[in-house]
Amino acid sequence: MKFKLIAEYFDKLEKISSRIQLTSLLSELFKDTDKEVLDKVVYLIQGRLWPDFKGLPEIGMGEKFLVKAIAMAFGQKEDEIDKLYKNIGDLGEVVFTIKNKSKAVNILSFIGNPNESGELEVNEVYNELVKIATSTGEGSRDVKIRTFTGLIKKATPLEAKYLVRFVEGRLRLGIGDATVLDALAITFGGSTDYRPIIERAYNLRADLGDIAKIISTEGPEKLKNISPTPGIPIRPMLAERLSDPNEIMEKMKGKALVDYKYDGERAQIHRKGDQVYIFSRRMENITDQYIDIIDYVKQNIVGDNFIIEGEIVPVDPQSSEMRPFQELMHRRRKNDINEAIKEYPVNLFLFDLMLFNDEDYTIRPLLERREILEKSLKENDKVHMASYIIADNVDKLREYFYQAISDGAEGVMVKSIGPDSIYQAGSRGWLWIKLKKDYQSEMADTVDLVVVGAFYGKGKRGGKFSSLLMAAYNPERDIFETVCKVASGFSDQELDDLQKKIESIKREERHPRVSSEMVPDVWVTPSLVAEIIGAEITISPLHTCCKGDRGGLSIRFPRFIRWRDDKGPEDATTNQEIMEMYSKQLKRVEEKPVDENI
Ligand code: ATP
């Protein structure tokens, strides 16, 4: 299959203005794609070479490198390329322009350029990109530059443009997993009716390329038999939130398992023979950061084929008391992992089991899963079961909540123990409900919102981005709906970093998956997620979240708390959750809080 075709689709995809067109164009691309390379094409359109969980390097060729490679490819000076880059502002466009010009010259001089005939194959491009990503050590710089120069020389102007953007990490078409799933359902199942089957398979085996290849070569029915596989992450099950213990117990039909909600890093731990893998909440491979956990797991969990889940929590090296989550960041920053382990020790608190001895436990009720987990764990001072009780009334829940807080937990996770209490991979539902410490604010909880645009500041902050247009995720329509404009809470350092962050994702037009009535100074591809707290949720004519006749929902006095690098845009707070928070707030005003301490 020719890479030219992909480049042409990239060009069309970039110009599209609605989610529906995006899906149907993607589906056309899948139809035109050879089955053998469909997995690679799926990765490429998402701007990567492989799924994050493989823990393999991404390309990330810096600008300097690229300018050198482009200069070499065209026999020009680096200064000239730099100058063009300054004028045009996009290295992809720079190569496109130069290639187009040289093409015209070649045609005029009747020479023709045999290297520019669009003969690049997808496999060839992919393999060369892999070579660039994986070459390390001495001499790797030259290998990278030479390999990329070779590609650029052979490419058509359009191919070269997208190759440069890809290698720069700027191929941000903003095509989320949901769009890919819809397009796969249409292409290989005939309609989006097939989406639930494909989605379930993807939830249990979160490798989109792999799922695409299976469906294209073996048909959608094959996906029905897919089960979790050690080494490939499962999409995590997520919790709803409520702030009233009475309501929680009602939802749980009077009885539930109540776990401490630990404030650490979620870890999905896989064991396949001698291999142990640890995946983060975002399904990134974090095994290398926790080599101590690998040992704990090997020593303390019986069995060599399982997938379990827990929270990694920093603890005080002397007292073993739980420490704040931020300590994990310090640990990550240390270069020497052995020193980091000593200085910032961690404990593991286990709360679920999804696979054991090749048996899929995601379809079993919670108590059954916990029983197997408990039996296979040799409890010790490093690895523990999450502290829990079975509560059958509100008082027990409330008491346990206070105990959790005083032990340094964030609150509790209340979990259904009914016959249908399966592990709902990849979805946020009422089988798990979180009850957290109240924040000193009228809004009962923070929200995680996606940046969709940015505004320049005035006065002291003139010329710099100083406020962000933030949106919630609407999973039904797979779009982002605006909720607020956030300008406060950033430290000076965070404001400085913001400039770079926005520059790297800015785009000329509104992204087709963004619904907004406000027009920011610059639009961006939805990719960054930030945690935001506000005074309250109100109705506003300016925002599109849950928009109805009276307006949309918006957050008053929003304040930036921190970046949520562990979340992708589709993990952001949903429009439905904002609506639920709004109704709760109304109820609180009308009825006064049921329990003012929570
Ligand atoms: P938050 O923003 O509140 O951390 P989230 O959106 O990351 O939440 P939720 O499902 O809403 O994810 O909250 C559950 C998170 O709490 C999990 O991702 C997990 O990391 C953490 N956690 C701590 N203790 C437990 C537990 N006992 N059971 C399940 N999750 C737990």
Image (cartoon, helix red, strand yellow):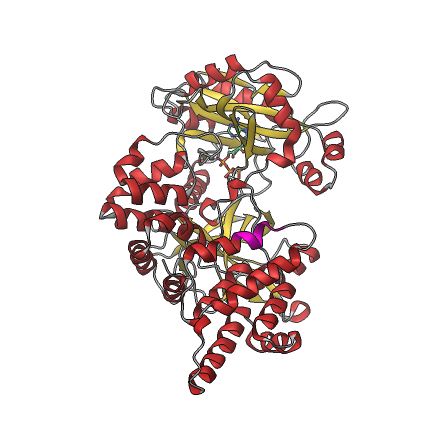
**Relative vertical location of residue 494 with respect to residue 93 in this rendering, above or below:** above
The image position of residue 3, as x and y in percent, is 40, 61
The residue segment tinted magenta is: 130-135
- Res. 457 in view: no
**Relative vertical location of residue 517 with respect to residue 320 in this rendering, above or below:** below
Give me the residue at 59% from left, 51% from top. 560
Residue 510, picture quadrant? bottom left
Residue 479, picture quadrant? bottom left
Residue 133 inside the magenta-drawn segment: yes
Give the main secondary structure of the magenta stretch: helix
Give me the residue at 44% from left, 73% from top. 114
Q: Quadrant of the N terminus?
A: bottom left
Residue 535 inside the magenta-drawn segment: no
Q: Nearer the viewer, residue 546 or 55?
A: 55
Give me the residue at 61% from left, 51% from top. 135
Q: Is residue 77 left or right of residue 468?
A: right
In the image, farthest residue toward the bottom: 108
The image position of residue 467, as x and y in percent, is 57, 61
The image position of residue 424, as x and y in percent, is 39, 31
**Relative vertical location of residue 506 with respect to residue 250 in this rendering, above or below:** below
Q: In this view, does 375 lie to the left or right of 20?
A: right
Q: Nearer the viewer, residue 60 or 238?
A: 60
In the image, farthest residue toward the left: 190
Q: Is residue 236 left or right of residue 20?
A: right
The image position of residue 144, as x and y in percent, is 60, 58
Q: Nearer the viewer, residue 303 or 316?
A: 303
Q: Which of 582 and 133 is in front in this view?
A: 133
